[in-house]
Image (tube, rainbow, N blue to C red):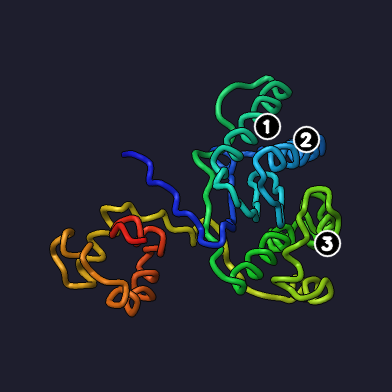
């Protein structure tokens, strides 16, 4: 089955999850974590990716990123290839290390951004490893430095550093893991949903609809998994 193209976030912000194949470890010593962080910084700069948060767990990685140039796939490919080459050489192994493609979820509003940000940094605590602020392989302790983390988002999403820290430490039951991540709809599937919900059987007739008629239906279509960008593409709208 061919891969379904990723939906592009309207904010260009994404929550990324990368797991080891068969959930095996992808970090076996402290040096592995350090090398991955160095490579993360290198390729983020190369592909103009802004890193807002990261957390490296023993068998998976969480990233919160801004991708203004739509270079996410190239960035993740180069990062993964470089790290796997290092890891396989050190461990004297061959083959895949990461499980298939990385998973991603679009961040389309400020509320969800804050939830995902907190979820990523609290991952070690929810996994019963240690307090989030004591975990050495997340961006918790580098969030106020400009080495890897772009801190421009703090004023936009949290108003202040104090509010951000208080928000992160607030007890919660947030779930932002791969179980919640839905595969993007193919254009063909989205088209069938459009026809059903708009009671129009003809694709040609769909493409004659005015923006005025479509607008009331956009919240419903979004709830079905159809983004505005996909709607524009399918219906060939400006």
Q: Earlier in the sequence, mark 1 or mark 3?
A: 1
**Left-right relation of 76 to 233:** right
CA neighbours of label 2 inside 10 A, class few (<14), some (14 to 19), many (20+):
some
Marks 2 and 1 close (CB-CB < 8 Å): yes
Quarter the C terminus occupies:
bottom left
**Left-right relation of 70 to 115:** left
Q: Earlier in the sequence, mark 3 or mark 2?
A: 2
Q: Position of residue 234 (x, y in %)?
A: 30, 56
Q: CA distance from mark 1 to mark 3?
A: 26 Å
| Residue at the image point whose x is 52% and y is 59% from the top | 106
Q: Tag 3's secondary structure? A: helix
Quarter the N terminus occupies:
top left
**Left-right relation of 190 to 128:** left
**Left-right relation of 129 to 112:** right
Which one is in front, 227 or 123? 227
Front disc: 3 or 2: 2
Residue holding disc 1: 83
Q: Which residue reaches farthest front?
A: 238
């Amino acid at each position: 089955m061919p891969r379904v193209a990723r939906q592009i976030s309207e904010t260009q912000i994404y929550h990324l999850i990368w797991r080891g194949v068969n959930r095996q470890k992808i970090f076996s010593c402290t040096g592995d974590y350090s090398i991955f962080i160095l490579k993360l910084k290198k390729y983020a700069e190369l592909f103009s990716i802004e890193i807002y948060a990261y957390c490296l767990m023993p068998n998976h990685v969480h990233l919160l990123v801004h991708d203004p140039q739509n270079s996410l796939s190239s960035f993740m490919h180069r990062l993964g290839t470089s790290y796997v080459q290092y890891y396989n050489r050190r461990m004297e192994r061959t083959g895949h290390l990461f499980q298939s493609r990385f998973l991603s979820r679009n961040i389309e509003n400020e509320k969800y951004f804050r939830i995902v940000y907190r979820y990523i940094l609290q991952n070690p605590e929810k996994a019963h490893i240690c307090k989030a602020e004591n975990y050495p392989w997340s961006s918790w302790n580098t969030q106020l430095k400009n080495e890897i983390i772009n801190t421009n988002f703090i004023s936009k999403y949290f108003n202040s550093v104090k509010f951000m820290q208080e928000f992160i430490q607030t007890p919660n039951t947030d779930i932002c893991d791969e179980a919640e991540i839905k595969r993007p709809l193919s254009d063909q599937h989205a088209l069938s949903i459009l026809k059903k919900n708009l009671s129009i059987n003809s694709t040609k007739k769909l493409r004659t609809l005015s923006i005025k008629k479509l607008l009331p239906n956009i919240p419903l279509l979004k709830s079905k998994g159809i983004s505005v960008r996909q709607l524009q593409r399918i219906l060939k709208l400006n």
